[in-house]
Amino acid sequence: GAVVSQHPSWVICKSGTSVKIECRSLDFQATTMFWYRQFPKQSLMLMATSNEGSKATYEQGVEKDKFLINHASLTLSTLTVTSAHPEDSSFYICSAKVRGNTEAFFGQGTRLTVV
Amino acid sequence: AQSVTQLDSHVSVSEGTPVLLRCNYSSSYSPSLFWYVQHPNKGLQLLLKYTSAATLVKGINGFEAEFKKSETSFHLTKPSAHMSDAAEYFCVVTPLMGRRALTFGSGTRLQVQP
């Protein structure tokens, strides 16, 4: 099956710094990528949807200036958490879809801890 | 609009007994439905998917699910639980066509007792 690689798998950063998370589709071209956030013992909440070459669409309540999403190519999307705070600590997961296919392929997730 | 309701937040079974994880959905569009499994601090793994073909879908690790349009349900079953099945399970819906994101249920934590 299709593989989505997410990096890093975990990161600890200081409050006020920025962290970049990468999501790559290794063996297919992802026309659409999604970023989700998951708090402990909760479901995945969609943060934003990005289509290659266009600006990301953010869900209500998600600050686009804080969570910068770039989808520069059909195989790479990045999420940058700017000026991170402890409340941004969470599990972030990306997923990718191919045009015409309803299935989404998920990265392994990134555990972000802001101290 | 679309939504998913997982009726049980927590299910506990004994090893070797059947598993039933319940899921109801609503969708304005013809839906695709999925079950994903997540082990602690891991990403999601697709168990099975329904995309308008056969209503009884067989997945990996002995799991299967039946799409029942009249009941708007997509319950996940397995005849005999294994200890390694202990994990979080998510029922997911997305429109059959288009680029929309997946909508996740709240999840069901499956415990398997020895």
Image: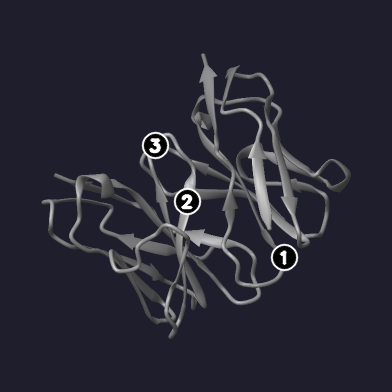
Amino acid type at circle 3 is Pro
State the mark number for residue B81.
none
Cα distance between the residues tagged 3 and 1: 30 Å
Amino acid type at circle 2 is Met
Q: Where is residue B100 in the image (x, y as percent from the top left)?
A: 60, 67
Left or right for B75, reference B6: right
Q: How crowded is mark 1: few (under 14 residues within 10 Å), some or many (20 or more)?
A: some
**Nearest to viewer (mark 3 / mark 1):** 1
Say yes or no: labels 3 and 1 on the same chain: yes
Left or right for B73, reference A24: right
Closest to the observer: B88 or B28? B28
Q: Quadrant of the N terminus of chain A?
A: bottom right
State the mark number for residue B96.
1
Q: Residues within 10 Å of mark 3 (few under 14, many from 20)?
A: few
- Which residue position is annotated with label 2? A45
Q: Where is residue B85 in the image (x, y as percent from the top left)?
A: 53, 31
State the mark number for residue B40.
3
**Judging from the image, what secondary structure is the residue with disc 3 in?**
loop
